[in-house]
Amino acid sequence: MKENKNKKILIFGGSGFLGKNLINMLGEFDFEIIVFSQKKTLEKKILKYIPKNNLKIVGWSLDNIQSIENHFLKVEAVINLCGILYENKRGDFYRVHSDLPAILGKMSSKHNVRNLIHISALGVSENSKSKYSSSKASGERRLLENFPNAKILRPSLLFGHGDNFFGQFSQMASISPVLPLISRSTKFQPISVIDVATGIINLLIGKRKKNALYELGGRSTYSFEELLKMLLEVKNIKRIFLPLNSKLMKIPAFFLQKLPKPPFTVDQMILLENDNILINNLPGIEDLGVKPKDLKDELIKIYQN
């Protein structure tokens, strides 16, 4: 779309699940895109989506983030998708989820960036016992202190091709007769990664009224158990559920979280003690011009085609 020609967008966190889908969809537009990545393999993954002359990959790290400030000149929008589910070293949650948004807010304000879109998470609170949640909430606050017109999106559980939740349990179900059922009654409101990416794009191209905060969830809420049952139904297989208490699971999680890529952590067990659904009556996905996809219909497309 030629009206976007030469408009520069900076994307942080482009190598993640949402980032790769967003970049894919941005290929339909004529933005100049700079993706900041710490992964050397990212370029090969996304060049197939975007013409090479419209895309630039820039290496960076949180330790030298000030060195990227020159890229903020004449920028239309900054999109921050950075997030981690576990820490490799103490303090990573706050460095990624709180310090980074604050710095991006300062740089964007200093260089008169028109639009800053930040992806947080549903249900975050600075009073949470979860470092993931409290650091995300801290990041929202510090971002708005430095860039009051930032747009913050809080999605629930994301699903789609290659997602962490259904993808992981689908792989597990293919090799094991038993599936762990942690906090079986905890509720989620899953939303399609494509819907969230579309909402971001609608904010970029000015299709929607730009409220400050959106909470994004799908059409319906489901318990952890209901989600696993739906997956098994779609795959037309039967498995035995092994109910596990999230509080008791903190014990093995304490030791497993010391692995380079832990299967689960104490912090994640804390998160599972609370529902992850829309409760605040804030603007949602439909306010971004998107009709949310049906979860079961999308799972059928993924696992039966």
Image: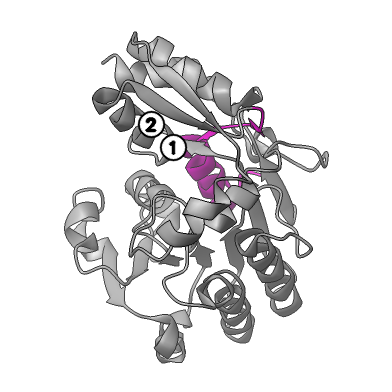
Q: Position of residue 202 (x, y in %)?
A: 56, 45
Whether residue 144 is visible here, answered yes or no, is yes
Question: Label 2 near label 1: C-beta < 8 Å?
Answer: yes
Give SS at disc 1.
helix
Amino acid under label 2? Phe
Q: Give me the residue at 27% from left, 70% from top.
A: 57
In the picture as drawn, the residue positioned furthest to the right comes out as: 281
Q: Position of residue 152 (x, y in %)?
A: 66, 57
Give SS at disc 2.
helix
Residue range of the region highlighted in magenta in the rendering: 185-208
- The residue that label 2 is drawn on is 169
- The residue that label 1 is drawn on is 165
Q: Alpha carbon of mark 1 to alpha carbon of mark 2: how far?
A: 6 Å
Q: Which residue occupies the foreground of this view, 242 or 68?
A: 242
Q: Is residue 190 magenta?
A: yes
Query: In this rendering, is residue 35 above or below 155?
Result: below
Q: Position of residue 277 (x, y in %)?
A: 70, 36
Q: Is residue 92 magenta?
A: no
Foreground mark, 1 or 2, reads 2
Please tell me in which quadrant of the rendered image residue 171 appears.
top left
Query: In this rendering, is residue 37 above or below 15?
Result: below
